[in-house]
Image (cartoon, rainbow, N blue to C red):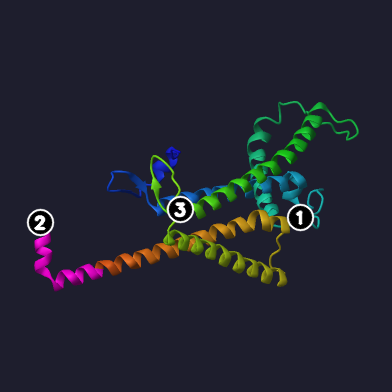
Amino acid sequence: MPCPQRFQAALQETVTTEDGVKMYTWRAVRRQHLRMLRKQTRTIVFFMALIEALRVGVVDIVYAGHNGTKAPGPEDYGIAYNVGYFISWLYMCLFAIVFVPLFSWWLPKLSSDDVSKPSKADKVAQLLMKLNMILLPACVGLSLVKHIYYVLSALVYVDGHAVEGRKLPANTRKNWLVRLLLLGGIFTSVTLGRGAFYILEEMDLAHVKPVEYLVIVLPIQINLGILFASAIQFKVEQRAVRKQTKIRDAEAVKYPGEKQSLIET
């Protein structure tokens, strides 16, 4: 399975085997997995924020009880609500800067003032609202499936693979230790994150909806766990390389004649 062009352009950490096969290192493969995991997490947060903005209303979520709008309800809190507020605020700013001075004075009014007699534009808007409330959760579910796929892929492809293909890594003890390290990083991140949110909720400093915790917070914790385990793996390999370099340098100092003969041959 060929790698995407963006993958090939972004990841330059390659090695060439004795057979002349060009391979990506495990760091390059892991970086690609982390990038895709972050992408899916951002997509989930964005779609969840759009759902909250549509549920509350763009104007109502921005003004929140002012200028004749309804006050925030008991369900108006959480990560998606706050991100939806920011997106709606940007939309209102662009609407006030672009639409009002350039288009509002000459375009005819499409909406109806009578709620009992909605216009065609109002009916189309309601239809689009219902359609979006179906498509957006479906997009969130699709992004979650892709996130799970990349998590499993990161646990499977713990070693480098060829640039022109993607064969399963060898079933070695080192690869299984790396998988255990990744699972340990995920477990640590999820446990510490859950404890931190529990303390914040008990102190009434932050509240997260149960759905948001499963859909938004848990994927972020998994991403951090994989990142933390990858950093540990990189540090361990760096230390091993430095240790081997010191051993070679010590042997070269101890047996300089053998080193010179090896260079000449």
Label 3 is placed on what type of residue?
A: Arg
Asked if residue 17 lies left or right of residue 44, the reply is: left
Q: Residues within 10 Å of mark 2 (few under 14, many from 20)?
A: few
Place residue 265 in its image quadrant. bottom left
Residue denoted by label 3:
30
x and y, in percent, of residue 13 in the image: 35, 50
For numbered disc 3, what is the local secondary structure?
helix
Decide whether the magenta segment is chiefly helix, strand or loop. Answer: helix
Residue denoted by label 2:
265
x and y, in percent, of residue 164 in the image: 39, 39
Q: Which comes sooner in the sequence, label 3 or label 1? A: 3
Point 58% across, 60% down: residue = 221
> Do tag 1 and tag 2 residues touch (Cβ < 8 Å)?
no
For numbered disc 1, what is the local secondary structure?
loop
Point 67% across, 56% down: residue = 214
Place residue 241 in its image quadrant. bottom left
Q: Nearer the viewer, residue 63 or 194?
A: 194
- Is 101 contained in the magenta span? no
Q: Which comes sooner in the sequence, label 2 or label 3? A: 3
